[in-house]
Image (tube, rainbow, N blue to C red):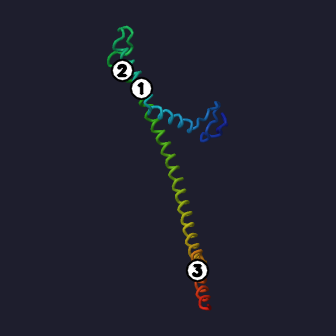
Amino acid sequence: MRTVREGRSHLSTPRVSRWPRKRHSPDRFGAFSEAFARYMGTPSFIGWMSCFIGAWLAWNVWAPQELRFDPYPFQFLTLGLSLQASYAAPLILLAQNRQEERDKLSLENDRALLSQSRSDMDFLAREMADINMKMNKVATRDFIAKQIAALESSVNSSTESYK
């Protein structure tokens, strides 16, 4: 018979951890990766990295032999640059994935806004057409002016005939 031990009753039940672990937010790490990728794409980073590599090479070529820490094949420098590249590539990809997700959301919002704008324009076009149809049955300013002019001319002509 199995006994209850360390907070679990069966092997299929996970054991309760005694050590509280901090939960790291994926957004926090994603924001870090975006900041890192953004910095790596700046001329400042290229300049500082070039100065660092130049100083490394200069020290290991022209410094006294006993002070050189990375002789000619520069294996330690190569290892350091490889490590930087191996960490930079996934962080840059993560930043690109997050940007792609933001672009998708932005595109969906733009499509919804376009759809709403199109339906609003269709509604306004129908309303304008309805107003135009109703205006054909209503006396406009030009119509009234023509009617008044016609009445004045008929009144003038009738008064002249009585003279």
Q: Residue at x 33, y 14 (%)?
A: 61
Q: Residue at x 48, y 39 (%)?
A: 95
* Mark 1 lies on residue: 47
Judge the density around disc 3: few (<14), some (14-19), many (≥20) Cα neighbours within 10 Å. few
Type of amino acid at the residue the image marks with label 3: Ala
Mark 3 or 2, which is nearer the eye?
3
Marks 2/1: CA–CA distance:
22 Å
Instruction: Kindly report which numbered mark, 2 or 1, lies closer to the viewer in this rendering.
Output: 1
Question: Residue reaching furthest bottom?
Answer: 162
Q: Earlier in the sequence, mark 2 or mark 1?
A: 1
Q: Secondary structure at mark 2?
A: helix
User: Label 3 to label 2, Cα distance in Å?
Assistant: 102 Å
**Residue extending furthest left?**
72
Q: Residue furthest front?
A: 163
From this view, report whether residue 94 is shown above or below residue 64.
below
Residue type marked 2: Gln
Residue ID for mark 3: 149
Say few, some or many: other residues with alpha carbon within 10 Å of mark 2 (under 14 / 14 to 19 / 20 or more). Answer: few
Q: Position of residue 69 (x, y in %)?
A: 39, 14
Kind of element beneath mark 3: helix
- Residue pictured at 40% horizontal, 22% vertical: 51
Residue 98, given in percent of the width and then of the height, sits at 50, 42
Q: Amino acid at mark 1?
A: Gly
Mark 1 lies on a secondary structure that is helix
Circle 1 residues within 10 Å: few <14, some 14–19, many ≥20 = few
- Tell me whether the residue at label 3 lies in contact with that at label 2, contact meaning CB atoms closer than 8 angstroms: no
Residue at mark 3 to residue at mark 1: CA–CA distance: 84 Å
Q: Is 68 situated above or below 3?
A: above
Label drawn at residue 75: 2
Residue 91 rendering spot, x and y as whole percentages? 47, 35
Disc 3 or 1, which lies upstream in sequence?
Answer: 1
Q: Residue at x 50, y 49 (%)?
A: 104
